[in-house]
Image (cartoon, helix red, strand yellow):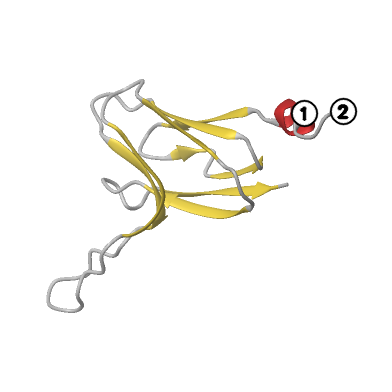
Amino acid sequence: MPPGDGQAERSKSTAVTIEAIAFDPADLEVSVGDTVTWTNQDESVKHTVTSGKPGDKGVPGLDNAKPDKPDGVFDGTLADADDTFEFTFDEEGTFAYFCRVHPVMTAVVRVTS
């Protein structure tokens, strides 16, 4: 088999649904070369799929808010129901992500070879 053919055969697409202000599944394992597609199923609710970690809004008078910490790996906006965003993972690692609009929405993609 020529080099690269095995990777092409293994590559697949995996779906994540955004519904009820949550990512489903919130913990996902894929292989290097796989594509993940996120679909917004929340009617009239905007979401993002932003790699990195959400900030902390803080408590006025007690502590300062900490800003979001996107890491720049991927960032998609899903403004309406049925909007999609996809990203192909080309390297191994653990990729945390969140919604900038709803920072309580967090999830992770674990990429293995």
Q: Which residue is mark 1?
A: 5
| Amino acid type shown at disc 2 | Met
Q: Residue furthest left?
A: 61
Asked whether, in this view, residue 111 is left or right of residue 36, the answer is right
Against 29, residue 82 (above or below) is: above
- What residue do we see at 66% from left, 42% from top? 32
Asked whether, in this view, residue 59 is left or right of residue 93, the answer is left
Against 89, residue 9 (above or below) is: above
The x, y position of residue 48, in whole percent, is: 33, 40
| Amino acid type shown at disc 1 | Asp
Asked whether, in this view, residue 11 is left or right of residue 21, the answer is right
Indicate which disc residue 1 carries.
2
State yes or no: discs 2 and 1 in contact (Cβ < 8 Å). yes
For the residue pair 20 and 96, the one nearer the viewer reads as 96
Query: Mark 2 packing: few (<14 Cα in 10 Å), some, or many (20+)?
Result: few
Q: What SS does tag 2 mark?
A: loop
Indicate which disc residue 30 carries.
none
Q: Residue furthest right?
A: 1
The x, y position of residue 41, in whole percent, is: 37, 25
Q: Residue furthest top?
A: 82
- What residue do we see at 52% from left, 44% from top? 26
For the residue pair 18 and 113, the one nearer the viewer reads as 113
Against 113, residue 25 (above or below) is: above
Asked where in the image residue 61 lies, by quadrant, the reply is bottom left
The x, y position of residue 113, in whole percent, is: 73, 47
The x, y position of residue 94, in whole percent, is: 58, 55
- What residue do we see at 30% from left, 60% from top? 68
Name the quarter where the N terminus is drawn.
Answer: top right
Against 105, residue 71 (above or below) is: below
Q: Residue furthest front?
A: 2
Q: What SS does tag 1 mark?
A: helix
Query: Mark 1 packing: few (<14 Cα in 10 Å), some, or many (20+)?
Result: few
